Image (cartoon, rainbow, N blue to C red):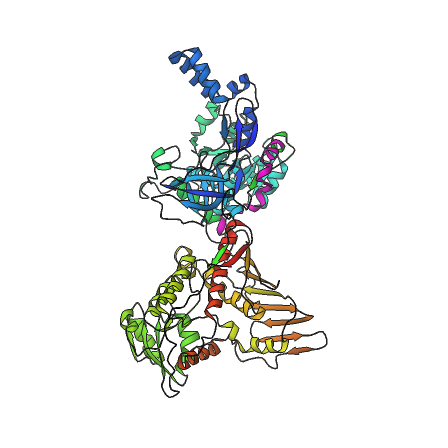
Amino acid sequence: MKQVVQNYKSGELALLDVPVPGCKPGGVLVRTAYSLISTGTELMKVSEAGMSMLGKARSRPDQVAKVVQSVATNGVPATYRKVMGKLDSYTPLGYSLCGVVEQVGAGVDDVKVGDLVACAGNEHALHAELNWVPKNLYAPVPDGLAPRDAAFGTVGSIAMQGVRQGESRLGEVALVIGLGLIGQLVAQLLTASGVRVVGADPDPARCELAERLGAAACGDPASPAVESAVAELTDGHGVDQVYLAAGGGSNQPVELAARLCRDRGRVVDIGKCRLDLPWNAYYEKELDVRFSRSYGPGRYDPEYELEGRDYPIGYVRWTERRNLACFLDLVARGRVDVGPLISHTAAFDDAVETYRRLEDGELKAVAVLFRYPEQADGAGASAAAPTVAVPAVRRGGRASAPVRSTRTPVRLAFVGAGNYASSMLLPHLARRDGVELSTVVTTTALSAANAQRKFGFAGATTDLDAVLGDDSVDAVFVVTRHSSHADLTRKALLAGKAVFVEKPLALTGEELTGVLATVEESGNDRLQVGFNRRFAPLLRQAEQRFGPRTGPASLRYLVNAGRLDQGSWYLRQDTEGSRFAGEGGHFIDTASRLLGADPVSVYAVAASGNEDLQVVLGYPDGSTATIGYVTTGAAGFPKETLDLVADGKVLQLDDFVRTSVYDGRKRWVSSRLPKARDKGQSAELAAFVRAVRTGGPMPVPLESLVATTAATLAVRASLACGAPVPLAEAR
């Protein structure tokens, strides 16, 4: 594999071929997708390496002191050999990245292969294609957060620890001196906390950027603009905190902090700047000077960083790993925007040239990212752009489902009776001839009793096993929270029941494989997933008007999903999966129905800071479907609009209330608006009941249900690697 290294003696930078690190216990092996250049710390190190030996000594008096002590202890010759040996060797660069877990070491159970993680540490999150990262130095990336943005996790944690050291409070005013990468993030974090921020930096572009991202006012520290802004915002009292995020040898930041800080204010040093404190100024105001140690508690503690021994949360609320996870969450929720900070993204192969341009001043940048190759070195496919397997459907040798007399009711049991079941499914079934609602199963006795009373179930219980063991029950509806769908489906199939499971069928590839293993084991393939839109009458009618295709088609599907209410269980992504994983199958299935095939590739791109997605599906005949899934649209705009274009014709669907077909000569419009949007639930349920009654084929082939589920899951894989993900049937 390749890694960026530097010889500190000669200053040489190189992209070196080095062995792949092993995956040790207590950590994970991560294939890098993006790594971030710290334009402050790293460039300072690169610059020091290019100095003469005298210059190096002047820049690092701490190391000179160690050399002097070594001479006293070991003598000049031994010390010289030791120092020269250390200088004349390659050292790594980098400490902030995002990548995909390729291997999981013993003792790690919070992530799995294929998960996207943000990693920290100047020994573990290096500019390298593969890194071994111990448990307390990585954090899972929230669903929907782009790998590019997650690569900021470490520098975000540094900024966050500085803000925590300042103990900022709502309504206070802070001064951030130095608006480089760390300073920009400090300013955003303070603004997100309800603190008004004044920024100071000699670069007008950085000042303008900070103001655009929320700072109240910014200016050159040598001009009166900063002092005037502080006076206006604080009624002349001075700022509550000053954050020193500047570097260099000037003592101006420390002096400016003393002049503009209020009595008994706080000064927090985050950057590496000169700290000759003017004694009188700091004494008279009794300023509280604090230092921020890198990413937070745990830093430089080998038991925490290397051995994975966490600090109890009751004693240490914000460790470096918790800071990392917190920062990722803020970016994912749009409270911090790192996108405007990215000045340049370079291919990893151009790393040496990129450093040269930064050092020479040719490339002016706040943040620079390395983008890594999609293909892995060595054997096998790339972990960064994996092929997602579509599990093969293998059926056992069970006899076909029995055919029932038209006079014999189909007996249905419901597992779950929440809002969707009560509003969209049960009203259709309760009034359908030939259907008997046998038993409803819920986790609480009262909810079961309410469903029994409202819809006329013959029985109500909290005992699932009793229902699955009831031979008189023909079919089981699984309408529970997403995380339980796969397990309950497996149990019902093993019990010999036909199963109707609301989407999604599964939240992971392992769950999907488990369901199909149950189909093979039991021989029971009587399964339907609640992809109801393909049954919508208006859509079926428009399909007939559009007619067969002869060439590839382009389909655009805009889903104006809107925001969820705070507290919705849909937001519990750690247990219930992402929002798109929960309902995206609806839209993929609809596209596949209209295009007459299952997708063969998935490419997904996420908007920065929210759940908005663009998902592009490729189909065998060259057709494409683009699903725009947005949560930030206007509430009054239709939820679902769709256009299908092929062979000189256009089919339009307007939120299941109107359809149109244009064929170049005339336009057909659905004859009348329905009284209510019919998204196909009634027709879907009728088809399912008919299949159970007659023993005929299920409404949608199992292979199609599996392909749609696999494509939905592939969205996360594509977001993780930033590339299209092929779908291939597992053999």
Query: In the picture shown, does residue 162 fall above or below 273?
Result: below
Is 71 on the left-hand or right-hand side of 314?
right
Q: Nearer the viewer, residue 192 or 613?
A: 613
Q: Residue furthest bottom?
A: 407
- Residue toward you, 464 or 120: 464
Find residue 422 and report its image quarter: bottom left
Residue 303: quarter of image: top left
| Residue 343 point in image, percent of width and height | 60, 41
**Viewer-nearest residue: 191 or 460:** 460
Asked whether residue 366 is in view, the answer is no
Task: Describe residue 572's horizontal placement relative to residue 233 as left or right.
Answer: left
Instruction: Tell me where residue 229 sits by quadrant.
Output: top right
Determine the residue positioned at 58% across, 41% down.
217
Left or right of 334 in this view: 27: left
Query: Bounds of the magenta span?
Result: 331-356
Query: Which residue lies at the image location 35% right of the left edge and 43% below the top edge?
Result: 317
Residue 113 painted magenta:
no
In percent of width and height, residue 532 lies at 48, 72
Residue 38: tell me if it is visible.
Answer: yes
Q: Is residue 452 above or below residue 580?
A: below
* Place of residue 267 in the rendered image (x, y in percent of width and height, measured from the top left): 46, 33
**Which residue shows up at 62% across the image and 34% down it?**
353
